[in-house]
Image: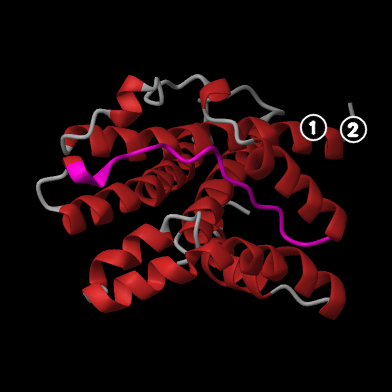
Amino acid sequence: MDERTLSSIIMIICFIPAIVIHEVAHGFVAWKLGDPTAKSQGRLSLNPLKHIDPFGTVILPLLLLLAGGPVFGYAKPVPYNPSYFKDVRKGELLTGLAGPASNLVMGVIGALLAYLLLLPGIIPPGIGGWVLTACYYFTLINFCLMFFNLLPIPPLDGSSIIAPFLSDKALRKYYSVQRYALPVLLVLLIAVPYVLNVSPIGIYIDATAGNLSRLLFGALF
């Protein structure tokens, strides 16, 4: 097996727990805030099949790969009903933040694990490079998912995070334009890089997730 194929396999393996735990975190926090929707629909499961979204998990990453842009994706959004929350705005905020927060924690754990496993005598000689690669990819993927999902564009988490900070009038207006948000996101992800050979979201991800990952792993490379 060549290095490129092995690297691709490692990235896929790292991507699965990143998106699964991201979605479970949303459902878990909503459940703790009084909303049983995700739990009743089996979405607190760590089974990846429960969370696969045909477009966001399969088609979108393939389209981005073919377009030569940065590859992102998302799992099937966990359902929740804000009417169960005692404080709707606070509940929306905490539920929305749960997914990106889980990716932040996993990314930091990936970096700490790299430093621990590369200590002398922890792992057999000869595989240290692949261990470092796996930990780096795991951290980078989690940070990419975190910053990507923080964009305030539905169906990404940033759309629910920003809502509690809007006035009632602004919130109604915001909800009214949400139906146009996904096409805008697709234009930014696919059309703009293809036409202009520049990816605004790719630049944003590299400046955030990329730099943060390189900072944490700088002493190991």
Does the magenta-highlighted stretch encompass residue 134? no
SS at mark 1 in the image: helix
Q: Is residue 67 left or right of residue 72?
A: right
x 43%, y 41%: residue: 106
x 66%, y 26%: residue: 125
Residue labelled with disc 1: 6
Res 219 seen here: no
- Give neighbour class at mark 2: few <14, some 14-19, many 20+ (Cα, 10 Å): few
> What x and y, as percent, mark residue 93?
26, 56
CB atoms at circles 2 and 1 under 8 Å apart?
yes
Q: Which residues are magenta?
A: 68-83
For badge 1, the amino acid type reads Leu
Rendered-image quadrant of the N terminus = top right
- Give neighbour class at mark 1: few <14, some 14-19, many 20+ (Cα, 10 Å): few
x 63%, y 37%: residue: 134
Residue labelled with disc 2: 2
